[in-house]
Image (cartoon, coloured by chain):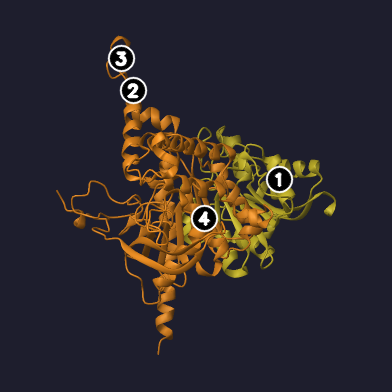
Chain colours: A yellow, B orange
């Protein structure tokens, strides 16, 4: 499993109900099903991803996050996960609210636009940053809501959400402790485990 | 021309078989049948472990002839040849496929058009009301007869999908998976309304004769044809009809206008006419009633989640973007209930211009998801068979 997904998998209790928003090829859920017997579901809209998930035996549901998650009742999942998808939804703040309505806790990861390479790209070249984890041209990218670690923490603070755990990783999804001394500068991928306001 | 028996991807020439279930068969409506017969076809081979059986459930106007040809000179294959055959979604190289004509049908199974052994006369309108639950029980008797303890998967589109859902709820130990295509957990009022118009078209035809048309050597061709025309329109999409028929005038201008001016008119008339010649009016009434009454949640105080908690199998739920008769929203209701019930479910909404009828067509995205799901089940059935043979002394 990808190193960041390993970290997420470690946080999930055996037999838990897990919802993975933008589950891609279903790597996380396939691993969790095999190792922790979770009752997991993934949402995705890419036809190729859906076929791959089906072949892996992952419960994949074709559903567009931008059309809302109102079909999922309150508290219907133990954990709601969204890996590197926040930046491509139409209303990221609304999706965050929905994640913590449906699940007791949520895990969100996103590419950090404050990474020194992105800053350097814009500063030195005067062009929109592209990188290993951000490979798209500005006019042809699913990433319509890129943000920095600082931006995200501002949103979390405004909403009063509880940060249970956070760290950053490199573009290879590996967590190196030194990066976390200056996460907004050295982290390529940011990881947040969040709880509802007030710790309820 | 290549012979049908030699077509690649076809099961070739097939022959219907007959199953006689003796003894009283109590129906949900309170009446009972003194034995019944089901006509069915099978494709592929049942493996030694009997783990690779698939049940195909047909829709409103379907029958047992789902794949292949009855004769070399048949113009068309069975109704679901797009999805059943060697290498297809329902791969007959791997699965043993059982496809019956439902009880109450008009293609050989006991129904309104067959003779009531008690009276020696055709059942006609006296044939009792049959429900989806009755069908499931009758299909289970057929499975017993074939030595199939458990189906690897029960598959159906539209009304067929409803049967697959009922199988999952009523006989959870006897199915490994259910495929529900363009189905619904129950019909909407609008959907029932279309069925009622179709029924009125039939019963108001003077040739219907209160259902006793056969003994009078008559047939409500007009009414049955009209019922089919209404149904057919609801199975297509606005866009799809526009693509297929357009609105060119046949005679070119209004001054020369004749009775049939638009292509869609002659198409519908042809559909209605040919249908009235091959389908029994009383069966049409019976099938639409079974559709209307279907409501598995009803037994659980209207709680679909509670109903689906009875199920143990994996589900595949597919719908089509332009299907308005059994819309994607109806499939979504099933999926949401399955998730709430903690059942394994895969679901996709297939982009298609062809409305409800999409489920009969070989659309690449549709067949690829369907085949991916079925291939996994086939692999499971084969693994079961190997494990089983390993246990043998």
Q: Name the residue under label 1.
A: A98
Q: Give left or right: position of B128 versus B73.
A: right
Residue in the picture at 39% in, 59% down: B100
Q: Which chain carries label 2?
A: B
Q: Name the residue under label 3.
A: B257
Q: Do the residues labelled 4 and 2 touch (CB within 8 Å)?
A: no
Q: Mark 4 lies on which chain?
A: B
Gap in angstroms between the C-alphas marked 2 and 1: 51 Å
Q: Marks 3 and 1: same chain?
A: no
A132 over B119 or under it: above or below: above
Gap in angstroms between the C-alphas marked 1 and 4: 38 Å
Secondary structure of the residue carrying tag 2 is: loop
As drawn, the label of residue B313 is none
Q: Quadrant of the C terminus of chain B?
A: bottom left
A86 or B350: nearer the eye?
Answer: B350
Q: Marks 1 and 4: same chain?
A: no
Q: Name the residue under label 2.
A: B262
Q: Marks 3 and 2: same chain?
A: yes
Q: Do the residues labelled 2 and 1 touch (CB within 8 Å)?
A: no
Q: Mark 4 points at which residue?
A: B132
> Could you say where residue B358 lies in the image, as x and y percent from the top left?
41, 42
B229 over B253 or under it: above or below: below
> Could you say where residue B379 lies in the image, as x and y percent from the top left?
42, 67
Mark 3 or mark 4: which comes first in sequence? Answer: 4
Q: Are marks 3 and 2 in contact (CB under 8 Å)?
A: no
Q: Which residue lies furthest to the top in this view?
A: B255
Q: Residue furthest left?
A: B1
């Amino acid at each position: 499993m990808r190193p960041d997904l390993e970290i997420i998998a470690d946080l999930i209790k055996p037999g838990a109900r897990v919802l993975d928003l933008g589950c891609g090829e279903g790597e996380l859920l396939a691993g969790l099903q095999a190792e922790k017997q979770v009752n997991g579901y993934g949402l995705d809209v890419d036809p190729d991803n859906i076929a791959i998930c089906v072949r892996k035996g992952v419960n994949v549901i074709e559903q567009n996050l931008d059309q809302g998650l109102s079909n999922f009742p309150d508290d219907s999942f133990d954990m709601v996960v969204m890996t590197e998808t926040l930046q491509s939804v139409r209303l990221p703040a609304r999706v965050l609210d929905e994640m913590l309505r449906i699940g007791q806790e949520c895990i969100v990861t996103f590419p950090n636009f404050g990474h020194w390479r992105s800053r350097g790209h814009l500063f030195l070249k005067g062009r929109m940053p592209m990188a290993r984890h951000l490979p798209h041209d500005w006019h042809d990218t699913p990433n319509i809501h890129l943000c920095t670690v600082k931006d995200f923490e501002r949103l979390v603070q405004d909403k009063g959400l509880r940060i249970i755990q956070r760290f950053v990783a490199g573009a290879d999804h590996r967590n190196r402790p030194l990066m976390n001394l200056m996460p907004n500068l050295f982290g390529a991928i940011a990881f947040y485990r969040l709880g509802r306001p007030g710790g309820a | 021309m290549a012979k049908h028996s030699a077509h690649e991807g076809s099961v070739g020439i097939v022959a219907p078989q007959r199953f006689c279930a003796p003894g009283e068969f109590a129906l949900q409506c309170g009446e009972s049948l003194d034995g019944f017969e089901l006509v069915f076809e099978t494709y592929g081979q049942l493996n030694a472990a009997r783990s690779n059986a698939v049940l195909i459930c047909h829709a409103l106007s379907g029958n047992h002839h789902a794949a292949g040809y009855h004769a070399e000179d048949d113009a068309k294959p069975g109704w679901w040849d797009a999805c059943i055959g060697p290498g297809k979604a329902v791969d007959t190289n791997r699965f043993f496929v059982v496809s019956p004509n439902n009880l109450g049908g008009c293609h050989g199974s006991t129904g309104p058009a067959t003779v009531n052994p008690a009276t020696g006369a055709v059942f006609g309108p006296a044939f009792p009301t049959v429900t989806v639950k009755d069908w499931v029980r009758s299909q289970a008797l057929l499975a017993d007869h074939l030595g199939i303890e458990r189906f690897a998967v029960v598959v159906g589109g539209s009304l067929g999908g409803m049967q697959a859902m009922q199988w999952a709820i009523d006989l959870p130990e006897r199915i490994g998976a259910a495929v529900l295509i363009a189905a619904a957990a129950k019909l909407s009022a609008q959907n029932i309304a279309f069925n009622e118009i179709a029924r009125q078209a039939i019963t108001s035809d003077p040739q219907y004769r209160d259902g006793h048309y056969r003994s009078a050597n008559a047939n409500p061709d007009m009414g049955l044809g009209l019922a089919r025309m209404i149904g057919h329109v609801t199975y297509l999409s606005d866009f799809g009809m526009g693509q297929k028929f357009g609105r060119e005038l046949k005679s070119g201008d209004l001054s020369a206008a004749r009775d049939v001016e638009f292509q869609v008119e002659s198409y519908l008339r042809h559909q209605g006419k040919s249908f009235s010649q091959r389908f029994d009016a009383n069966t049409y009434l019976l099938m639409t009633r079974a559709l209307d009454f279907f409501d598995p949640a009803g037994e659980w105080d209207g709680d679909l989640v509670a109903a689906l908690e009875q199920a143990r199998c994996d589900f595949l739920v597919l719908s089509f973007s332009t299907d308005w008769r059994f819309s994607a929203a109806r499939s979504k209701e099933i999926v949401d209930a399955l998730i709430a019930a903690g059942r394994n479910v895969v679901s996709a909404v297939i982009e298609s211009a062809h409305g409800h009828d999409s489920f009969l067509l070989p659309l690449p995205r549709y067949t690829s998801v369907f085949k991916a799901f079925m291939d996994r089940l086939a692999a499971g059935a084969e693994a079961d068979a190997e494990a089983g043979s390993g246990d043998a002394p």
